[in-house]
Image: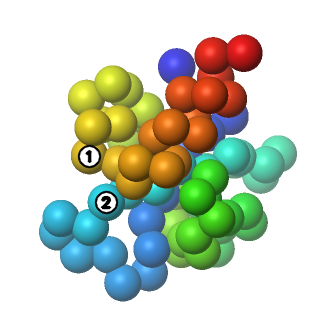
Amino acid sequence: MSHGYAFCEIASAAPGTPWHIRRLTHVGKKLAGGVDTVALCNTKVARDLGAEITFHHLQHCCPTCSRSYADETSR
């Protein structure tokens, strides 16, 4: 479901902070930080998460990223 996308988070993320989604480049996931694109909502993010993008996780994600992801992947 998430080919080409990753959940990511801001540098100051804390429990309860919503995750974001970003498009991956040829470099792939950056789990230790240093991401090379912004989130779909244009938020600057710091690192990717290992979690796969699933419907369950989308419910806890930034609403703008979730909508953009759904729009982009439904084409």
Image x and y of residue 9, in percent: 43, 65
Looking at this view, name the residue that lies furthest to the bottom. 12
Which of the 4 image quadrants contains residue 18?
Answer: bottom left
Does residue 24 appear in the picture of this structure? Answer: yes
For image coordinates 82% across by 45% down, the residue present is 26
Residue neighbourhood size for the residue with mark 2, other residues' Cα within 10 Å, grouped as few (<14), some (14–19), many (≥20): some
Under circle 1, the secondary element is loop
> Where is residue 54 drawn, in percent x and y?
37, 26
**Residue topped by disc 1:** 60
Above or below: residue 51 compared with residue 18: above
Residue type (three-letter) at the residue carrying disc 1: His
Mark 2 secondary-structure assignment: loop
Residue 72 found in image quarter: top right
Q: Tell me if label 2 and label 1 are in contact, CB under 8 Å.
A: yes
First-in-chain label (2 vs 1): 2
Q: Along the line of sight, which residue is nearer the eye, 32 or 44?
A: 44
> Which quadrant is the C terminus positioned in?
top right
Residue extending furthest toward the left:
15
Answer left or right for 55 relative to 53. left
Q: Residue furthest right?
A: 26
The residue at 57%/35% (across/down) is 69
Q: Specify the label residue 52 is tagged with.
A: none
Q: What residue is disc 2 on?
A: 18
Cα gap from disc 2 to disc 1, whole angstroms = 6 Å
Q: Position of residue 25 (x, y in %)?
A: 79, 49
Q: Residue at x 46, y 40 (%)?
A: 66
Residue plotted at (44% across, 81% down): 11
Q: Is residue 71 above or below residue 68?
A: above
Q: Is residue 15 above or below residue 59?
A: below
Q: Amino acid at mark 2?
A: Pro
